[in-house]
Each structure stands twice: as structure tokens, then as C-alpha cells.
Amino acid sequence: MGTLAIEPRITRPDDFYEALIKAHRGLSDEQSRQLNARLILVLANQIGDFDVLEQALDLAREDGVARD
Amino acid sequence: MSGLDPAVNQKGIRQSYSYPKYPFRRPAAIDSDTVERQRVVIVGAGSVGLAAAVEFACLGIETVVLDDDDTVSAGSRAICWSKRTLEVLDRSGVAEPMVDKGVIWRQGRVYRGEREIYNFDLLPEAGHKMPAFINLQQYHTEEYLVDRAVTLGKTDLRWRNAVVDIYLDLDGGGLQGGGGALLTVDTPDGRYQIRADHVLAADGVRSTLRRSMGLEFQGRTFEERFLITDIRMNADFPMERRFWFEPSFHAGQSALLHRQPDNIYRIDLQLGPDADPVEESKPERVIPRVGKMVGKDLDFDLEWISVYTFTCRRMERFRHGPVFFVGDAAHVVSPFGARGGNGGIQDIDNLVWKLALVLGGEAPATLLDSYDAERVPAADENILNSTRSTDFMTPKNQVSADFRHAVLSLAETAPFARTLVNSGRLSLPHVYAATALSTLDDDAFAGKGPVPGAPALDAPVLFNGVEGWLLNHLGQRFVALCFVDLEVLVDDWIEAWNKALADLTPSVDLVVVGRGDIARRPSIAILDDIAGQAFARWAGEPGSVYLLRPDQHVAARWLERPTAPALAAALARAIGRKEAG
């Protein structure tokens, strides 16, 4: 069973973050939602391992629910 | 139904199929003072009840079938029959007329709007007797089953015999019915009763038996309405399943087109949750919808219309004392995935051999408990798949709609997204993994070949110089399927094994698949693995042995020939002997 990496792995974090925000530039809310959905699917396929994806879902949900 | 011209249905549509009318015969019990006694009574002559009767008949067991009607299925209903269903029905001689008449298909195409986003092939390899699927109207299937039952001569088919009540508390046996069940039957000539040792409740989704026994039927109902219609037209659409998401010809979310024999096509259109079922099933409403789909150049006639919602539900348990619920009486699913009719056939595939062995005194009554243990998880698997398909087709909230949109928009360019598109996961046989009847192997097969609980795999074989199929040499009894290399002399052990297997209860037949020089054929008949596919599919090595149940599912397997006690222990386990451990 794979384990979700929570230590840093992104090679150029600031560049990535900027690119992520930029990708949404000029999009309506609906288009942004669509982009995010597609991006999640593409990244999920890159991860591949269901066990890791499940841990990612847990982490994302835990964090989101705790702070909202 | 009775009293209506059967070729004209409730909406005044004339069907091209002419329904057979089976004769009512006055049951002898009406004129007798004693209660009729029967060993096995099947309630409901639908495809599942009839398939059970025919399977029993092949095993030499007489049954009584009670049905409130006097003809076959009203409307085409279940049209997709899976490879496994055909293999099951081939044991009783019904599959060949079905395949001859049916539309054979294995390709599916999925569209978004006008564009094809992907296609699939359900049976990409050759060397199977049965196709991946055939489409055949349920009324044709039932007609072949009735014909077969009549030919076999072991089934007492009683038309217009409506079971109205069931009573289980016989001889103080309690509600579990130690003394069997007492059925009250209404006929046009009056009422009578049958006391049955065992009852198969095959009386459909609105099962009278389930209701009169006060049993629950729980699950989920989907609000979305669908229009299902059969049309007749002279067109030359290919033999494939076509499914559209967001079709350009229909404002709803999805559409399905499926070809049947007799120039009939099944069309399924999603209408949304607010559609009015009465209005939407009027021909003047249906015709323009269909016209937009098939194109204005084609003339067509309506055969059948139904507007429905889906439910996915099941009984908590399928066995209640002497009563076994099968098919839609026990569980229902949404139609995308063809898991209703095929699931029902697998129920009786699982049940009939068990009852036959118990009736014959060759297995303990505890074997019957395994019907629940094996078929409830199978029903759950069908419900899970069908629920997921329905959820994909009918997004319930914004986030579901967004992800569906994302999947569909990626599917055309990114192959991974196609695996997420769900237009129905088509019926596959359940694997009875780790049930009490299976002997788990030590993984000597490295995960290859059919695992314990899985159904047998077909392959072309040569037998006494005649080309045939492996599955036709199995089934309806226990089989030890042995793989041998003919370069090595095997006469001695075959003789010894034949003797040992015949002494077991129930007896086990030896079926030997050989490869190598057939001129060295030993003294007994051997299935020659002409294409090498039997060895390949079963991960066979010279010396490997599979113990197969009468339903052709694997009970146990050994990479190297097992000892006689090991085989006997696996057999004991497979017939529900508790002490087998």
C-alpha cells in the first residue's frame, strides 16, 4: 500500500503556485470549477494508486472541514 | 392480461410479435379431498423460473411451475443476455436457439453530443463458444424455455394458476417451515392447495410470496424518469450498443440505442425527474422524440413504450426456510448493465444443483444455507455497479455534474478518463470468493487462471476427433478437470483416479485435458487442447487439477495432483459438510 507524501516534493513551489492561479485567469466561476475538476482527474491519474488517492481525499477533507 | 388481444398492448400499439397462448388445464387437486404434495414448486414462469425448471429437468427432477398468466413476457424487457447466462443455459439446451435468433454483439460506442469519445470490445479474444452478449427479447427467451421444458417432459407447467397465499407453520415447524410450505392457488376453475417441500419464489419484483410472508424489500429509488421504447424499422444500424451523453437529438442527459432481432430497436431516453409518466408514454409524444433520434428519413413503428424510474433494492436474505427467492423477487437493479435478467439466471445456476443434491440425499441440508451466503454478495455487487452507473448518468448536485463534465471532456483525448465514463458496467459473473464452499489455494498459481469461486473458462477442444468446447464437457455434476502432458504416460493414474472419484459422494467425473502427441492418447477419452487456450486460460501445468462444482464454478485447485484425501476434503467442503473445516 502506497503512502501519501506530505513532505515537499514540488520542484519549484512558487512557480507552480503562480501557474495554478494564472491558469484560472479570465475564467468565469463555472469555468474555474471545470478547470479544477479536470485538473484533479489528471493529477489523480498521475498518482494512480487508489490507496494514496484515498489518503489524499482524507487529508483534503479533514483540513477543509476543520477550518471552515 | 387475459381477455385482451395479446398483440395489442395497453397503449393501443400493435406489436409484431404474436404471443403464444398456453392452455389452462384443470388441476387434479381441485377435484380431490387430499392436499397435493410436491417436492419442488416454482412460482412464476418468467425467464428465471423457467430456467430453473429446465435445469431441474436436465437433472431428472420433476417440478411444478405456477404462473398467473398464460403467455410469455409482455414486452421485450430484459434484452441483453450475457456470455455467462448463455453458458448456463447451454447446459440445458436453450442457448443455441437464443444465439441463432439473437443479435450478437460485443462492441459498444460512447458518444458525447455527436462525437464518439471511445468504444470498447467486450470479448477481444477468440476461442469461446458463446459471444459476449446477445440481444433477444425476453418473450423469445421465455418461449424457448417453455419449448425446452415441454420437450424434456419433467415440468408440470400450470398456466393461470395464481398463488395467492403461502403458509409456513406446518407440523409445528415454525415460520421456518420445517414441514415445507402450503401454497394456496387460484385458477379459473377454483381454488386448491399444494404442500411443497421446497418453493422457488420467481414471481418478480412485485412478488406475491414476498408480500404474503411480510418480508422487506429495501434500497434506493432514483427520481430520474426514463422513457424506454421499442421501435420497428428497416434500418441497418450496426450490431453494437450505442450510448450518448448529452445527445444533440434529445434535451435529456443520455440516450441508448440497442438492436434486437426482427428489425426491432431498443431506445432508452433520460427524461429528467419532473417528466410526467402518463404524458410521456403517449405515442404522439414518443414518436417525435424517436424521430429526432433515428433521423427523419426513416419510417418506424412503435412496438412498446414504458416510462419508469429505477430502484435498487434487495431482500435482507433470499432464503426463508423452504422458500428460496430468485431473480427480481429477491433483488432489483437499474437496467444499465444488464444485471437484472442475467443476475437472476445466476441465482438459479447457484441454487438448482444444491437443491438437487440435497433432494437426492447426496449433500447435507446445510448446503442450502450457502445460497444466501453466495448470492447476497452477488446481488450487492450488481446493485453497487448499477447504482454507480445511475449516479453517473443522473448527477445529483453541482459537484457531481462538474466531475462528470470533466470526465467527458477529457475522455476524447486522454484515454485514462474513458475508464471513468460510466454508461453501465455490463454484467459479469460473480466470483464466490472465500465462501464456505471454496477451498482457498496457496497461490501456487500466482494469481493466474480462475480462482476458487470463479466460473469455468471456455476453450476449443477436440474430443474423439470432433471439434467442440470445453464447457460442454463440464457442468451439472462435480468434475475433476485434470491437465496432462501426453508425452508422459498417464494411463495408470487415470485408471486409479477414475476408480477413486467414482467412489466419492456425490461422485466426481474425471475430465482430462491433454496437450502433446495425441497419438499417445491413453485408454480413456481426452480433450485435446487444439489451440492451447485451455492450458493458457486455466494456467494449467501437467498435473494441475481443478475441482469444479456442478454450476461450473471452481471449488478448489491444485498446481500438482492432490492426494485423494485432499480432494475428498475439498469435495466435502463444496457440498456444505461443516466438519470439513
Image (spheres, coloured by chain):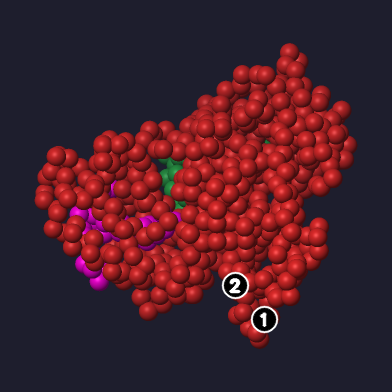
Chain colours: A green, B red
Q: Which amino acid does label 1 sit on?
A: Leu
**Whole-number angstrom distance, CA of label 2 to CA of label 1:** 11 Å
Q: Which of A19 and B83 is in front in this view?
A: B83
Identify the image quadrant of residue B423: top right
Eyeballing the image, is B288 above or below B126? above
| Amino acid of disc 2 | Asp
- Same chain check for tags 2 and 1: yes
Q: Mark 2 points at which residue?
A: B197
| Percent x, y of residue B190 | 81, 64
Residue B389: x and y in percent read 62, 44
**Mark earlier in primary sequence (2, 1):** 1
Dot 1 corresponds to which residue?
B170
Residue at 27 percent of width and 64 percent of height: B501
Q: Which mark is residue B302?
A: none
Location of the C terminus of chain B by quadrant is bottom left
B405 lies left or right of B123? right
The region drawn magenta spans: B539-567
Foreground: B363 or B53? Answer: B53
Which residue is rendered at x = 78% and y = 39% of the image? B6
Q: Does the magenta stretch include residue B548?
A: yes
Q: Residues within 10 Å of mark 1 (few under 14, many from 20)?
A: some
